[in-house]
Amino acid sequence: MIRFVHDAVGLRAFLLSAKTRQAAITPLLHLRRNARNPQMMPGAGTLYREAAASPTRKGVGGMGHEQIGLSASHGTASSGRDERYRAFISYSHVDEHAAARLHRWLESYRLPRTVVGRSTARGEIGRKLSPIFRDRTEFPASGDLHEEVTSALSASACLVVLCSPAARASRWVNQEIALFRSLHPDRPILAALIDGEPADAFPPALTQPGPNGVVREPIAADFRRRGDGARLARLKIVAGIAGLALDELVQRDAQRQLHRVAAITIASLALAVLLLTMLIFAINARNEADRQRQQAEGLIEFMLTDLRSRLQGVGRLDILGSVNERALAYYGEQGDLTLLPSESLERRARVLHAMGEDDHRRGDLAGAIAKFREAQRVTGTLLAAIPNDPPRIYAHAQSEFWLGYTDFLRHQLAAAQPHFEQYLQLALQLTTIDPNNVAYQREVGYAEGNLCSLNLVRSADATATLRSCRAALETMRDVAAASPRDLGVQLDLANRYAWLADALKAGGRDDQALDQRRRQAAILDKLVAADPKNASYRQDWILSRYAIATSLRDLGEMSASLRSAREARAAISQLTAADPDNVDWHRWRSRIEKTFPQTAKEN
């Protein structure tokens, strides 16, 4: 920026000439003021009051309802005067942020449409108060005002002074006030008190005596919170610049606020309606997704229960594998499994149990173990979240059983024992929660039977083995008594007779073992008669006949033994022909033929 550099004599001459010009026109101004309004006091305008005209005030007065900023005389405010700027903002560099905020607000403020085009002492009112000049620089290296500042002061309709202790101490603010007053004695100077008390904030030039020697007392717009507050203070400044009554702007501002509040309220209501509509759509979409998921999982539940039992009954492991793969693929399409409901995760664990069981039947023990371990991880996590939830206890019990069973099949008996024992503890926990639940009692029978079989294979103490096997039989008898028409329970009871028979045989009680085997066979005969195509019944019937054959052989009854072995071999041949992929059946056929070679020569 370019600066004027004056010497002290030049500056004094400039200010003296300005005062001379003011003195020359002052009598005429006073005459015109008094002629128009006898109540008006001599001075620069209504923004200043002489101290003699009113009692001394300690605070900052309000602008009231008067027409702010109007001069008492308009003789010098001719239409030909230079007023490129609606206002000039004078401020200390310390108050730059406050000046910038006020500047932005004033230039963006839109006056009410009802006053646009009206003629006032400030001229014709436009829609906006622009342009407004704001000096951004102080000049510590020079003792005079910058050329641009001087030019802007000359072309400004009024002066807005930001009053603060920093402004009072600023020589530039004082010089700008003095120069503006000398150039335009009839134009208003608007004081904006932003900090401090009036005595500490008003620059000396603002309150210096007028030509008549009377001290000027400015009425300021008080921006302090304890004063007018920023909103009303800004409106006072607008009223002073535009030459309007403050009440008119306050009323219009209140109307604007009401309109704004109404608009915001309407927009908020519209947004609320939109959000509510979207929420309803989202809830409906979620409900539809839940309904579809429930339908899909209902189908999976059918596949894992009724359909699976029927396929097992006819020995179709190939179809079972397809069913399991389809069910597992469904859960794989669900994305993040942690976001699925617990019921869905429990079904997934059952799918893994079923797939592991089928892998075991097909001879893929490694695949079965992988699926059982994943199932145990899921069921263990669910149970840890709600330790006393019966469905979760039951699901985790199945995981423990299958892991123990795979260890048992691999002859890793030490690894199998903790799984079987944990299975028993979980089953007992279920019966503690619901003692009358037959299904839970049945789980206890299964767990006791597993420990019975483990003790037999480990050749444990005969007394302990018999105790565990008898306990399993007694538990299953109670379950059978409570569910006399449940064929599955009858099959379990037959199995417990078989384990007790093996325990007795291991203790050298062959005749008692044969008696238990015949009890098993009697139950299986009824089951096969009730459902001849059930492969599970037929498999157990075959094994019972093979066990009877070995018991009869050990007792020396060779003819009866061979007859029973032939029945077992013929039946197992039919099963392997129906399902060639069933490894268990091929294994049992080989054992029968190895134990009784005569049967291998027969078709």
Image (cartoon, rainbow, N blue to C red):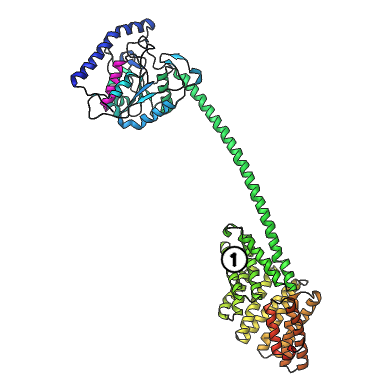
Q: Left of 276 or right of it: where is 56?
A: left
Residue 571 part of the magenta-drawn span: no
| Residue extending furthest toward the bottom | 556
Picture coordinates of residue 233, whole percent (x, y):
41, 25
Q: Residue at x 42, y 18 (%)?
A: 242
Decide: is 277 above or below 359: above
* The quadrant where residue 265 appears: top right
Decide: is 61 above or below 25: below
Badge 1: residue crowd in 10 Å (few <14, some 14–19, many ≥20) = many
Q: Is residue 265 visible?
A: yes
Picture coordinates of residue 384, whole percent (x, y):
56, 64
> How many marks are shown on the rendered structure?
1
Residue stretch rendered in magenta on the structure: 169-184
Picture coordinates of residue 25, whole percent (x, y):
29, 8
Magenta portion: prevailing SS class: helix
Q: Left of 330 or right of it: where is 525?
A: right
Picture coordinates of residue 183, whole percent (x, y):
30, 16
Q: Residue at x 60, y 79 (%)?
A: 408
Query: Residue beneath label 1, please?
Result: 379
* The quadrant where residue 557 appears: bottom right
Considering the image in quadrants, where does the N terminus appear?
A: top left
Disc 1 is placed on an element classified as helix
Q: Left of 149 or right of it: where is 113?
A: right
Considering the image in quadrants, where does the C terminus appear?
A: bottom right
Q: Residue at x 68, y 56 (%)?
A: 294
Amino acid at circle 1: Thr
